[in-house]
Image: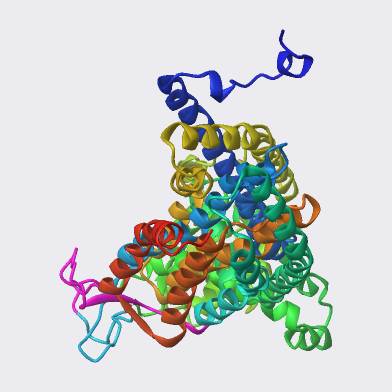
Amino acid sequence: RMSAESQWNPFFDPSTCTAAQLIFIVCIYGYALFEASNLISDGSELLLLVPQWAPLVGSIVLPVLGAVPDGMMVLFSGLGSNAQEQVTVGVGALAGSTIMLLTLPWFLAMYAGRVNVSPTGQLRYKRPNGAPATWDKLDPPGNFSLFGTGVGIGPELRETAQMMVFSLIGYFIIQVPTFRTDSMLKMTDAPEEEKLHAMATEAKVEKQFALLGLVVCSVSFLRYLWKMWTDGSSGVGPVDDTIAAATVEAMRDGRLTLRGALSKFRESKWCNLKDKQDLQEALVNKQTLDEVRRMCKLLAPFFGLYDVNGDNQIDFEEFRMIFKDVRENLPKEAQKMMFDSADTDNSGYISFEEFVACFMSFALDPGNEIKGMAEKRRYKSNPAKYLDNGEANASDAGEGDDDDEEGHEEEDMPEDLANLEPEEQQRRIKNRAFSKMAMGLLLVLIFSDPTVDLLSEIGNRLQISPFYISFVLAPLASNASELVAAYNYASKRTAKAMTTSLSTLTGAAIMNNTFCLGIFLALVYFKKLAWEFSAETIVIILIEMIIGLSVIFRNTHTLAHGIALLSLYPLALFLVYVIENYLGLD
């Protein structure tokens, strides 16, 4: 008779399914976890568009939520009645996720972001003076030279790699005493009762080391988050670059307007300047300078798009196109007034510095006063009252006549953001972000446990350890978003973008070494599990050490290095098999 618990269980019992049904369920559960990972990632990145929260989200929320799918897989694998057996699935997810992130996405990022490398090791990131119009960072286009193309390793990435190597200490704490207990108690041909007794004795010895490892993982986890927070708050580093890139992409896609992106800037000291003394105080204020630096990061891609020849100048028509690109509907009169105010030498061009000053004044315009003055200016024959120098060209008075013809040209904002105040834009962004993250977390909580049962059953059917099944399948569902993000960042082919891309991957490995391993060690301590994963631990440490040291001691990685790192992924599975079956370790 079916138990009450089984009656309310909406999931299939894997042990009663046929092979075809198991394959079908794998696709369903895998897709659910894949969508959950994407929802969590998309929701988190939306919060990067909220300026007040962006440093917190980029430095803490994104790394933590990115590790949640793997962490929940580890957690649910150790909560069942047969935790000692099923926790192998969690180990496979942890090892597979860590090693996959540091190999396959790493190679794809290197492939997407590679540039030419000279025989002396010089990377072709900067355009030389007098370069022809056909100059490109990758020459010829599609160059696949193994040693003639590559990427640079920046100091930020090198620092993150050092933290990744340091975060392995949790594995050492639990693994070193395990060698001694395994050598004393492992009995391959002993009766089942003696094996269970030996395992219980081993768990008792390892329990205290698991607690110590849990404390160390927690401290390392908090230390990493603190570093990310300080980097994100400083206005420099990969976290701030990630925030800027997400904001620029949102403006280009029409999900955010410039004033929405700069809502925090409007609340800064710049809005409260009353005299010269206030200005001097604001200019020496670190927070204010960080905000100006962030504004420059947001505006530079749009300015560079129209500054084709690189002379640091754009004309009025290009200035107007940038307004459309940043999704701001401002009449031509208002745009002309801003441009003329910045064009102090009346050359018809403005520099990047003048361009930033224009948009700073626009961001600080709390009630569309510029737009209002421009509307009045249509009917004024003398616009001198709006100009700092008290002068105006006679032609300015007549330019308002053309506005009616071109007014509709600029209203191409999406319906849900057009004509919204920045506060309303921010409110809608927050609602979308929280709903996506909530749905993603709900899917993770619902499907992690049945996925563990499923992978365990597949291993039993194939008569191989569930570790290998989980190692291959689990990361494909839980880490797909990191793979795509790393590739997209790197495809910009800049040194900064490459640092951001690879730092994201090493950061994910740090989260696995601290957050996910901490969950695992908590299970070992509270559930009294034996640490039977020496082979897996050795391989994780070995792969991370190879990649970490290659980053720390090499300034350039060629495409050949990328292929070598990619080969570590299948090699890891082979090493686990050899260590378990030929060296006799767990």
Main secondary structure type of the part rendered in magenta = loop
Residue visible at 50% across and 48% down in the picture: 467
Q: Quadrant of residue 565?
A: bottom left
**x%, y% of residue 79?**
73, 41
Image quadrant in which the N terminus is located: top right
Magenta segment range? 132-155
Q: Quadrant of residue 265?
A: bottom right
Q: Is residue 481 magenta?
A: no
**Total numbered badges shown on the rendered structure:** 0
**x%, y% of residue 491?**
36, 62
Q: Nearer the viewer, residue 169 or 107?
A: 169
Using residue 171 as the reference point, say whether residue 130 is left or right of it: left
Q: Say if 354 sits above or below 209 in the image.
A: below
Residue visible at 46% across and 81% down in the picture: 549
Using residue 82 as the reference point, say whether residue 502 is left or right of it: left
Q: Residue furthest left?
A: 140
Residue visible at 78% across and 14% down in the picture: 4
Q: Is residue 502 visible?
A: yes
Q: Is residue 244 visible?
A: no
Q: Say if 86 sits above or below 232 in the image.
A: above
Q: Is residue 138 magenta?
A: yes
**x%, y% of residue 481?**
50, 49
Image quadrant in which the C terminus is located: bottom right
